[in-house]
């Protein structure tokens, strides 16, 4: 037995989630009479992490609303910058977003990253345990109820991914302060204290170093620094701020993972 028949439309940025025949104008959905509006939205393909306000006949309703016959639902996109409950703002990235994770760390953003596929249940549980925003291109993962908060990464290009995260969440940036390899904080390091970790050519050519307080990886301004500096400057323009000067030493050196 069919339940109430409703119509709905989705914001333009959400149309990629729904079937092609439902992407323009109003479309009809027959509900079962007991499922919440949140469930109906997800059944149409839109993760609730990507749904902003839900409007029924122009008025906002919660995801727990039970649709009634003849209602029209507008599914809006997430407002930017998005407010996330709790502080500080921290991220968790799945196995497919390693480059994005390293770039966020380059900017001083706390970005945990699993470089092995630990499975959706474990990722969702880690998001909840550490209260991290889970970033993923896996729509099914983002539908798991136990995640703390989540966001779909729309592009497969690292430049666009980084811009999207910065514009959506507006995290505080502190470039060159976090290890791109393990996410640990960096500290200034005396050359003598790290000399046994350096190649002879590096010892001769550089005098200013930083070291990760967690994994002890050593950084200096080497061959890759100019490329990383360009990434930082672009990100700071996106964020509408400026770098803090040239005193910091960050991951601009060979052993650091490429950004």
Image (cartoon, rainbow, N blue to C red):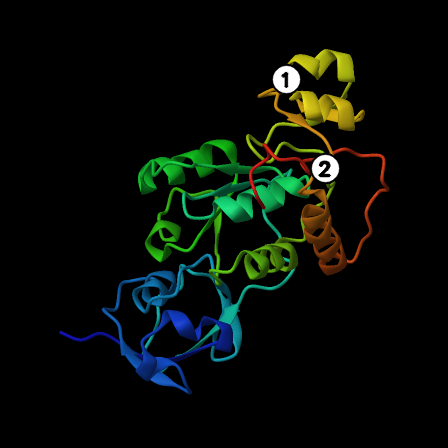
In the depicted view, which residue is nearer to us: 168 or 147? 168
Residue visible at 52% across and 79% down? Answer: 58
The image shows residue 128 at horizontal and vertical percentages of 45, 37
**Circle 2 sits in a helix, a strand or a loop, which is it?**
loop
> Few, some or many C-alpha atoms within 10 Å of disc 2 (few <14, some 14-19, many ≥20)?
many
Q: Is residue 189 above or below residue 139?
A: above
The image shows residue 224 at horizontal and vertical percentages of 66, 43
Q: Is residue 7 at least partly visible in the picture?
A: no
> Few, some or many C-alpha atoms within 10 Å of disc 1 (few <14, some 14-19, many ≥20)?
few
The image shows residue 145 at horizontal and vertical percentages of 37, 47
**Circle 1 sits in a helix, a strand or a loop, which is it?**
helix
In the depicted view, which residue is nearer to us: 73 or 59? 73
Name which quarter of the figure residue 204 lies in: top right
Residue visible at 58% across and 46% down? Answer: 259
Residue furthest bottom as drawn: 25
**Contact (CB < 8 A) between labels 2 and 1?**
no
Q: Is residue 192 above or below residue 147?
A: above
Q: Is residue 117 left or right of residue 234?
A: left
Q: Is residue 52 above or below residue 236?
A: below
Q: Could you tell me how many numbered marks the image carries?
A: 2
Q: Earlier in the sequence, mark 2 or mark 1?
A: 2
Q: Is residue 143 above or below residue 35?
A: above
Disc 1: which residue: 197
How far apart, in angstroms, are the residues tagged by discs 2 and 1?
20 Å
In the rendered image, the quadrant that contains the N terminus is: bottom left
Q: Name the front one of labels 2 and 1.
A: 1
Disc 2: which residue: 176
Q: Is residue 155 at least partly visible in the picture?
A: yes
In the depicted view, which residue is nearer to us: 243 or 124? 243
Residue furthest left as drawn: 1
The image shows residue 144 at horizontal and vertical percentages of 35, 48
């Amino acid at each position: 037995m069919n339940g109430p028949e409703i119509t709905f439309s989705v914001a333009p940025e959400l149309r990629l989630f729904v079937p092609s025949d439902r992407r323009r104008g109003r479309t009809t959905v027959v509900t079962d009479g007991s499922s919440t509006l949140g469930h109906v939205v997800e059944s149409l393909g839109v993760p609730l992490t990507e749904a902003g306000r839900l409007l029924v006949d122009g008025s906002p309703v919660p995801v727990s609303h039970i649709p009634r016959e003849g209602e029209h639902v507008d599914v809006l996109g997430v407002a930017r910058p998005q407010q996330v409950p709790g502080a500080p703002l921290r991220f968790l990235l799945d196995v497919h977003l390693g480059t994005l994770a390293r770039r966020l760390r380059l900017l001083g953003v706390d970005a945990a990253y699993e470089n092995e596929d630990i499975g959706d249940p474990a990722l969702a549980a880690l998001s909840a345990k550490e209260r991290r925003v889970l970033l993923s291109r896996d729509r099914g993962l983002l539908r798991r109820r136990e995640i703390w908060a989540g966001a779909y990464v729309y592009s497969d290009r690292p430049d666009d991914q980084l811009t999207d995260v910065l514009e959506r969440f507006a995290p505080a940036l502190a470039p060159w302060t976090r290890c791109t390899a393990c996410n640990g904080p960096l500290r200034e390091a005396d050359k003598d204290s790290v000399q046994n970790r350096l190649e002879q050519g590096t010892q001769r050519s550089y005098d200013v170093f930083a070291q990760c307080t967690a994994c002890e990886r050593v950084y200096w301004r080497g061959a890759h620094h100019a490329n990383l500096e360009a990434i930082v400057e672009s990100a700071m323009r996106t964020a509408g701020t400026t770098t803090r000067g040239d005193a910091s030493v960050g991951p601009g050196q060979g052993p650091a993972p490429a950004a």
